[in-house]
Amino acid sequence: MSYRVRLFCLSMFLTGCHTMHDPTPPDAAERPVSTTTHGDVRVDEYAWLREKENPEVIEYLERENAYSEARMSHTEALQETLYGEMLGRIKEDDTDVPWRKNGYLYYDRTEEGRPYPIICRRRGSMDAPEEILLDVNERTRDGGYINVTAPSVSPDGRRFAWLEDTSGYERCDLYVKDLETGEIVESSLHELSPWSLAWGNDNETLFYTRQDETNRPDRVYRHRIGTDPSGDELVLHEPDGRYFVGIDRSRSGAWLVLGIGSQITSEYHVLAADDPWGRFEVVAPRRQGVEYSIEHSGDSFYILTNDDAMNFKVAVAPTATPGLEHWSELVPHDKEVYILGVDAFRNHLVLSQRRDGYRELKVMDLRDGSSRVLELPERVSTVRPNVNAEFDTDVYRFGYTSMTTPSSIYEEHLDSGERSLLKRDEVLGDFDAADYVARRITATSDDGTEIPISIVHHRDVEPDGTNPVLLYGYGSYGSSMDPRFSSARISLLDRGVVFAMGHIRGGSEMGRHWYEDGKFLNKRNTFDDFIVCAETLRDSGWAHPDRIAIEGASAGGLLIGATINMRPELFCAAHAGVPFVDVMNTMLDPSIPLTVIEYEEWGNPNDPVYYEYMKSYSPYDNVTAQDYPNLLVTAGLNDPRVHYWEPA
């Protein structure tokens, strides 16, 4: 949650969410455009706002920004106070926990007054001299925008490759630096996808991906450092607009792994990393609705799949013959446990999984088949894998946080169970975790489904019906909103605000069925769940009936838009961040980035059944003349996923 959102929510709470009548909001000109689909005529009065190069559009957006500033002007002193508090808790001069790979310790560090990380390493120990691989601050143009992705050191440790985006359009330039001389030895590749980069074991070959006109990564290439990129070999092109491609190395370093995936279907190809100019071989051809991923250890691939297993299972297959007919079950399906991922090492597997709405880590010994689940200090918490780059190790690193415990990095010996805390994020000032209480309560949706709600509050706050509440939600793509710490949130809690997170369907908190029950023709469950979360907070005394604010971003912005259309009187304020609210216009236009891929999340409106259902909840298509809560709607002019004109 951004500083701006916290300031907005606090100003609404502290003014009692009263509506202010001045200044007057800007009016956008109505220029109706009609479209007909399945015989249904839809009229869009504001279609012209898509014209990004139109000066009238920019002028209108500037007026909206001016209105927002004017509307918030009475809170300027409060904003300054809050900003000072939030910034004052952040340690700007900080260093990540180093992680080991091939004899080096790698880490990022930040310096006060410099916004971007410095990527470093030391040979052998942290007492050795520091080697700066990349100071991202020095790559910016006059301190402007930059995003560095896919940083990757060659297997011999002598070259460092990265992808760099300075536009925000997610079209990247590739750079390779010789770490012995400091020279940039490759800078001739442009317009690359930001997600994938992989070295061959010859230390000369790099694999990368490119995107099509809709920003879908659809091609994998291989390139020899220092050669003309016009001669790069196209390894694979995926023509189906529902699928995207990516490439990586196995943790063992033995295999290059090329993945092709849609929202619900996947396919993998592998190539020995010692033979980077060889031919990739498919592991198992795609089958609609079947997902899988692979990890490598020894002579086996360990395969996580939902084939006849909604919550996924783990299979094993020989690397020499990895086809489906050779898969044998290692970890069977469990309807109570949703397996999210597998990390493979020489002697162990570590499974990341969900049980009863919480994440956990399960360690399996490949030598004797024994297993155990890592114990955690708090129930309402989150645990997930951290950087575990080395393959031949018996030590596992994981991240842990809760709504009262700052992000922490632990390391555990997988045989002995001995655990050490490597780092806990420092919260500057007088923060004391004992001042705050986290708990989980349950709401019951209209169909009888129990919906978990995580809440955190100051220890002096009681469920007496007087509290302002900020309720956060997402509920799409199977993405779970796990309880985690936020130092900026303390400014809310210290002022008596209760922060709540609704674990609504469309996420996967309670298993894969939780996701399936909140997508396609079940999408309205997501909105119903969120509404009942708000009602439960009110009815249980945690929320004052007139002081409930809600927030969500991207697909969570769709949640906010749909919810305030359905039950506007329930909320005093709402923030929709880069919200996906024009569902019909977006999903009916396959030229828009990612639209075709999204058919497997929302449905394809070219099918009349999906068309009618999607239209029934699309926020833009269901705005009516009614009293809405105070709204903060934020957008990014160059956002490549949710275009500015949707929130505009």
Image (cartoon, grey):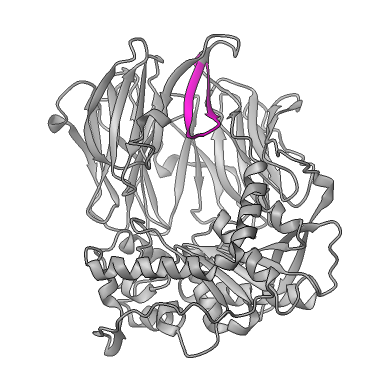
Q: Quadrant of residue 82?
A: bottom right
Q: Position of residue 394 (x, y in %)?
A: 64, 23
Q: Which residues are magenta?
A: 102-121
Decide: is 291 above or below 577: above
Query: Which residue does the image show at 65% across and 38% down from the upper left?
Result: 399
Q: Is residue 449 visible?
A: no
Q: Position of residue 443 (x, y in %)?
A: 72, 72
Q: Position of residue 567 (x, y in %)?
A: 59, 83
**Residue situated in front as seen by the camera: 643 or 491:** 491
Decide: is 540 above or below 80: below
**Residue situated in front as seen by the camera: 107 or 308:** 107
Looking at the rendered image, the quarter that the C terminus falls into is bottom left
Looking at the rendered image, the quarter that the N terminus falls into is bottom right
Decide: is 162 above or below 324: above
Decide: is 7 above or below 145: below
Q: Position of residue 210 (x, y in %)?
A: 25, 43
Query: Which residue does the image show at 60% across and 10% down from the upper left?
Result: 127
